[in-house]
Amino acid sequence: MAIIDRERRYVEVNPCHTEVFGRSRDEIVGTLVDDYLPPEELPTVDAEYHQFTRDGEFSNERAYVKADGSVVRVQYAVCTEKVTGHDLAFFVSHVMEGADAEKDEPESGVRNGEGLSPREREVVQQVALGLTSRQIAEELTVSTETVRTHIRNARAKTGTRTRAQLVAQVMGTGTLAGD
């Protein structure tokens, strides 16, 4: 997760975000999101940012360049928040790997996340920490397919298409905090 200002500069990042980029917090904070994009990704940034500022939220997939020069593909979701009088963007990203890269269309259902079961909330919390389905399965001592089912169900209930969008929406409604 990260907080970004209106100029697309990082204001704050969590440890998981620093791991994705392979850089320290001090190296990231104050830099532009664009600084970590491969050249072929840059032409779409302004249009997506315009759509985000118009709608107040946006989600997509994008490639990012890590400190070692390797490229990682992430799903991300971003929504606006007013903090201490400043418009900031709350940015959640999820590294796509293997079966975690699925991107299903949401089914109809509850849209605010309040209908999540305690286990679905627990799984979403683990996703928010940056864990993969395999890691969550190990942590919760269930099968990887069970974890994926909980994620699919949570996405259907919230009307979200990606893990990043799911985490952003559920955290934005505060439904991760309560049981």
Image: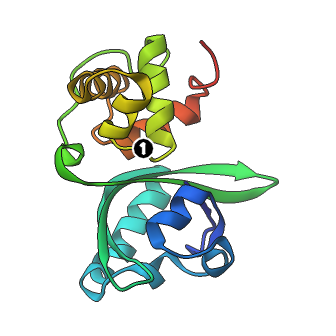
Rendered image quadrant of residue 146: top left
Residue under the point 59% across and 12% down: 179
Question: What residue is rendered at 31% in x and 28% in y?
Answer: 151
Q: Secondary structure at mark 1?
A: loop
In the depicted structure, whether residue 19 falls above or below residue 166: below
* Residue matched to label 1: 131
Residue 163: horizontal and vertical position, in percent? Answer: 35, 41
Please provide percent x and percent y for residue 73. Answer: 28, 64
**Residue ID at (21%, 49%):** 101
Q: Residues within 10 Å of mark 1 (few under 14, many from 20)?
A: some
Where is residue 94 drawn, in percent x and y?
Answer: 38, 52
* Foreground of the two, 19 or 64: 19
Height in image: 13 above or below 103?
below
The amino acid at mark 1 is Leu
Tell me the quarter of the image containing the N terminus: bottom right
Residue 150 left/right relative to 130: left
